[in-house]
Image (tube, rainbow, N blue to C red):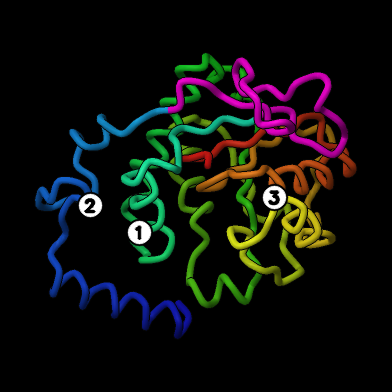
Amino acid sequence: MGLTKNFKKLGQDLLDLIFPISCLICGADQTFLCAQCQAQLPRLDQQQCIGCQKPSPFGKTHPDCISKNTADGALAAAPYRDPNVAKIIETFKYNFVFELARPLADLIVETVNRQGLDEYFGEFTIIPVPLHPRRYNWRGFNQAELLIAALAEKLQIPCDLKLVVRGKFTKPQIKLSAEERKKNLDNAFSIIGDPINKKILIVDDVVTSGSTVNELAKILKRAGASEVWALSAAHG
């Protein structure tokens, strides 16, 4: 374990002593998200096309929107605009509360099952949205990799953490416009594995404009991937 990770683990242990674990929503002891509050989180009733952001059955990309530069579909579990959903994801991502990976993965699996795509995704390989090494070293983990560990187990499909790497250090997407997001990601990713004839599921905590997912889909398809979808805990 690196020095950064050691410091962060020590910091987390101290925080656990000072601030005992409790549900982020209701304050119940011993868990960051109790079963009752997890069950009451809002779900997305309608999935959207990742191209035009309009409603689409099963989250499949509309025929008029799909190309070699877009994902073939995307599923999101919950609306990021909901304050409780946002609080959970931000705590997971920025406060290093790894325990929230499993309930967030549960929300994603529930969405996959509700859409009837569990068997369809059985032929896919899961990959994370990769972090640049500088950001990974600062944070000490990739939240998408933590989600993948739980998802691969629950969906019974393989994962590949090394198929794609991020070689360009980019600005945080959340601060940019849709057009700026696309430019920000130009040549950000490189493929170091073999995606030929593979079906790929890209996993991230939040999908907003779809720029990151579509950039990954573009390079994966150009390298021979037969199909690319995205899974996320939230959309917003």
**Of helix, strand and loop, which mostly describes the magenta segment?**
loop
Query: Which label number is shown at residue 24?
Result: 2
Q: In the image, is residue 32 above or below residue 118?
A: below
Nearest the camera: 20 or 47? 47
Q: Which structural element holds mark 2?
A: loop
Q: Residue at the location (61% across, 65% down)?
A: 172
Query: How dense is the environment of label 2, judged by Cα within 10 Å: few (below 14), some, or many (20 and up)?
Result: some
Earlier along the polypeptide chain: callout 1 or callout 2? 2
| Residue 55 in picture, x, y percent from top left | 61, 21
Q: Residue at the location (60% across, 44% down)?
A: 208
52 falls in the magenta region: yes
| Residue 146 in picture, x, y percent from top left | 46, 52
Per the image, the residue denoted by label 1 is 91
Q: Which residues are magenta?
A: 44-73
Q: Which structural element holds mark 3?
A: helix
**Contact (Cβ within 8 Å) of mark 1 with mark 3:** no
Q: In the image, is residue 113 above or below residue 96?
A: above
* Tag 1: amino acid: Thr
Per the image, the residue denoted by label 3 is 212
* Tag 2: amino acid: Leu
Query: How dense is the environment of label 1, judged by Cα within 10 Å: few (below 14), some, or many (20 and up)?
Result: some
Quadrant of the rendered image containing residue 132: bottom right
Query: How dense is the environment of label 3, judged by Cα within 10 Å: few (below 14), some, or many (20 and up)?
Result: many
* Tag 3: amino acid: Thr
Earlier along the polypeptide chain: callout 1 or callout 3? 1
Question: Residue at the left extreme?
Answer: 29
**Contact (Cβ within 8 Å) of mark 1 with mark 2:** yes
Q: Residue at the location (48% across, 71% down)?
A: 140
Query: Is 215 displayed left or right of 88 in the figure?
Result: right
Earlier along the polypeptide chain: callout 2 or callout 3? 2
> Which part of the image, by quadrant, shows the N terminus?
bottom left
